[in-house]
Image: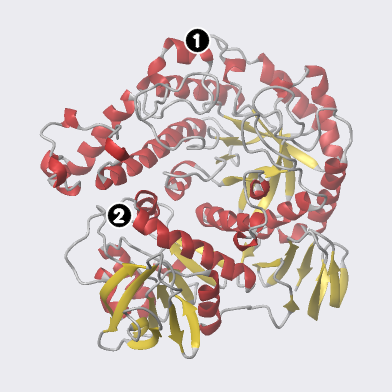
């Protein structure tokens, strides 16, 4: 039996649904998996009725039989709690467990994730099924880990049931204690929204133009995250009573309106992710828009998972293996030969030591009949199975990589307050979306690996970075921290004072943790360390030309929004605007502070602008003395105990050439190589240094 995430090898697995297949196929499937390099299966996440076919009637023979075959074939198993799809008898008898649309219409049985986290009835039934499964299977020798639910907040990340309103009121009572405090936090005096009784408070409901108090929405998002974390913790606490020492608890996916760091810190041992780069090639997407880097941008998601994991090591529960699409959406072409390998190595490069492919065989019924797995409906050997065998050969050859950590050259600071504010505030999202994409793209195209670094926000610090973590990065970008708390300001001041370089963008520091705009000079609590006074600001109007800032003779675009700046005390003007009525005014200021410095840029960061920052701050292309790679390739380094492993990933459907400037060991072949190396379309290479 194979353990995963032990730091000694990279293990391959797959998602398997024994309830979908004739029982006579089970053993043959498990043996065939092992013949092709798969040594673990994930099961049971949608199979509640197999254990509780009617209320209170618990039977275990189905998964008993499957696990007996897993034991016989020495196959490792990750067992899932089945709460993502409540059974029909439950939703019919207890409709209060269902989620609802904002107008109150219940989301009925027939899909998945149609329940709400706050129904006391659903929590009672969920805790009971988890307890029954854990007590029966928790000590099974072939179970190595447990997945809680499935893709929390996928499909929908908003909840409008009556149970949610009741729970929302309690959440607010615990947070504010009094209605006066709630009214103050929500600015309820505006538009006469003042509340005089708790019974007047609801989850958001339909309003004219769908305009809802933004401060209410901010707390509502926090409430959803709190509810989700609480639901997961309920299950995790039960599972811990029964599972074997060394078995892990996990969840698959990172979704919105959810503090994934808190979820992990409270309920999991390790984070898993569902990785589908082929979404970049959906028929309703624009795969010719190379500026967004297509499938390569999934490295951005993997960087998020790496941050959430805490250790930098994580697993992939669902790795793309075939074409996908439901019968009503998300249709896409099949991955080309080599892309399955490329995407697997993409995940491994970013820290995944376990890869589970979705799925073993394409389902022949239901909504996901077009969501293909390794095998087609026919069950015959195909090119994807052949490619899987080659992936197994490659991952066996690079097993030394397991346990090593991704090496970043700089970090991008994030926090959930600002993530959620950008979701509800279009002013914030316009600048944030450009800069998030721009900095990531610049990182990729200059081969300058980056990390996302989450810092504490006003609600919770679980799993977030400390000053010690921040000091691992010589440069940190914090593109648009609209909300800045006293705690955040103090943390950033310590980082800069100790020698760090902090880069800020426009729209910094103009809100407090309630989402209100205090009457202070901007950039608010970061005014001192930035040495900057924001004296005016504006969106760039549609009829304006491109706005640029001259930075020592190099023009960089200040996109979307303009902060017109003046220096304070030691602040030094590095660049001035070249256009519009603010021409000649400061657009970039650098402030020496302690041993470090802060750059304040009065715009959003496009790809090209971010590339200039990386270059001028001296962190771009950290491996240029070792390797030359074209733009089509991603370059990633993992390292451990002095050993370094360099990944080269070619995302182009054309072959390409890289140049090794030093002799390196090709881990696939074990041979020493240098000089010119040809990579085929979607080709990969891993070198020991």
Disc 1 and disc 2 in contact, CB within 8 angstroms:
no
Q: Residue at x 72, y 61 (%)?
A: 401
- Left or right, 112 with respect to 543, comes to right
- Left or right, 130 with respect to 321, comes to left
Chain-order first, disc 1 or disc 2 = 1
Q: Residue at x 41, y 26 (%)?
A: 99
In the rendered image, residue 147, in percent from the top left (x then y), is placed at 57, 35
Residue 3 in sight in this render? no
Residue 520: quarter of image:
bottom left
Q: Residue at x 53, y 55 (%)?
A: 304
In the rendered image, residue 328, in percent from the top left (x then y), is placed at 62, 30
Image: 276 above or below 430: above
494 or 238: which is nearer to us?
Answer: 494
In the rendered image, residue 110, in percent from the top left (x then y), is placed at 55, 20
Q: How many marks?
A: 2
Dot 2 alpha-carbon crowd within 10 angstroms: few under 14, some 14 to 19, many 20 or more: some
Dot 1 alpha-carbon crowd within 10 angstroms: few under 14, some 14 to 19, many 20 or more: few
Image: 57 above or below 417: above
- Residue on which the image places disc 2: 458
Inter-mark Cα distance, 1 to 2: 42 Å
613 or 529: which is nearer to us?
Answer: 613
Label number found at residue 55: 1
585 or 674: which is nearer to us?
Answer: 585
- The kind of secondary structure element at disc 1 is loop
- Left or right, 177 with respect to 450, comes to left
């Amino acid at each position: 039996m194979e353990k995963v995430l032990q730091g000694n090898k990279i293990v391959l697995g797959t998602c398997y649904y024994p309830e979908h297949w004739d029982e006579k196929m089970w053993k043959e499937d498990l043996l065939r998996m092992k013949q092709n390099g798969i040594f673990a299966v994930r099961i049971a996440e949608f199979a509640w009725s197999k254990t509780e076919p009617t209320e209170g009637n618990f039977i275990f023979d189905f998964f008993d039989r499957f696990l007996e075959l897993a034991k016989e074939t020495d196959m490792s198993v990750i067992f899932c709690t089945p709460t993502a799809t409540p059974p029909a008898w439950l939703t019919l008898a207890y409709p209060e467990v269902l989620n609802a649309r904002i107008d109150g219409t219940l989301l009925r049985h027939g899909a998945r994730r149609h329940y709400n986290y706050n129904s006391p009835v659903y929590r009672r039934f969920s805790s009971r099924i988890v307890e029954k499964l854990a007590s029966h299977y928790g000590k099974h020798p072939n179970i190595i880990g447990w997945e809680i639910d499935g893709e929390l907040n996928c499909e929908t990340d908003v909840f409008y049931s009556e149970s949610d309103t009741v729970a929302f009121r309690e959440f607010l009572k615990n947070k504010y204690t009094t209605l006066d405090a709630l009214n103050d936090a929500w600015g309820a005096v505006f538009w006469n929204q003042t509340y005089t009784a708790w019974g007047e408070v609801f989850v958001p409901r339909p309003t004219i133009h769908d305009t809802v108090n933004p401060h209410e929405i901010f707390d509502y998002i926090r409430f959803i995250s709190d509810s989700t974390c609480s639901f997961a913790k309920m299950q995790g606490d039960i599972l811990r009573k029964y599972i074997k020492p060394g078995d892990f608890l996990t969840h698959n996916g990172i979704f919105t309106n959810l503090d994934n760091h808190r979820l992990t810190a409270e309920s999991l041992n390790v984070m898993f992710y569902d990785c589908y780069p082929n979404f970049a090639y959906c028929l309703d997407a624009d795969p010719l828009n190379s500026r967004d880097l297509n499938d390569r941008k999934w490295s951005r998601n993997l960087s998020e998972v790496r941050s959430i994991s805490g250790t930098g090591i994580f697993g992939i529960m669902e790795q793309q293996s075939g074409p996908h699409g439901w019968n009503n959406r998300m249709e896409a072409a099949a991955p080309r030969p080599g892309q399955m390998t490329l995407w697997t190595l993409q995940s491994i490069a970013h820290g995944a030591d376990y890869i589970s492919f979705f799925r073993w065989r394409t389902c022949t019924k239901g909504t996901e009949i077009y969501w293909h797995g390794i095998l087609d409906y026919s069950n015959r050997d195909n090119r994807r199975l052949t490619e899987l065998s080659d992936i197994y050969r490659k991952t066996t050859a690079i097993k030394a990589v397991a346990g090593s950590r991704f090496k970043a050259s700089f970090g991008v600071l994030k926090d959930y307050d600002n993530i959620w504010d950008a979701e509800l505030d279009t002013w914030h999202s316009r600048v944030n979306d450009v800069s998030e994409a721009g900095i990531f793209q610049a990182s990729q195209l200059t081969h300058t690996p980056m990390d996302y670094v989450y810092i504490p926000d006003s609600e919770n610090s679980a799993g977030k970075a400390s000053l010690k973590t921040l000091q691992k990065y010589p440069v940190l970008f914090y593109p648009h921290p609209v909300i800045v708390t006293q705690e955040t300001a103090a943390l950033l001041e310590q980082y800069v004072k100790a020698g760090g370089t902090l880069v800020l963008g426009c729209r910094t520091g103009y809100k407090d943790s309630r989402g209100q705009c205090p009457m202070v000079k901007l950039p608010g609590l970061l005014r001192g360390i930035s040495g900057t006074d924001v004296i005016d600001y504006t969106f760039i109007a549609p009829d304006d030309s491109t706005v640029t800032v001259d930075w020592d003779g190099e023009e960089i675009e200040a996109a979307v929004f303009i902060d017109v700046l003046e220096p304070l005390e030691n602040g030094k003007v590095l660049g001035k605007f070249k256009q519009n009525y603010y021409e000649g005014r400061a657009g970039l200021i650098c402030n020496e502070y302690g041993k470090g410095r802060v750059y304040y840029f009065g715009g959003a960061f496009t790809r090209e602008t971010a590339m200039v920052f990386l270059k001028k701050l001296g962190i771009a292309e950290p491996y240029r003395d070792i390797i030359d790679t074209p733009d089509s390739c991603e370059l990633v380094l993992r390292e451990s105990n002095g050993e370094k492993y360099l990944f080269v990933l070619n995302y182009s459907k054309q072959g390409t050439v890289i140049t090794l400037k030093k002799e390196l060991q090709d881990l696939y072949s074990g041979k020493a190589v240098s000089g010119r190396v040809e990579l085929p379309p979607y080709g990969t290479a891993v070198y020991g240094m």
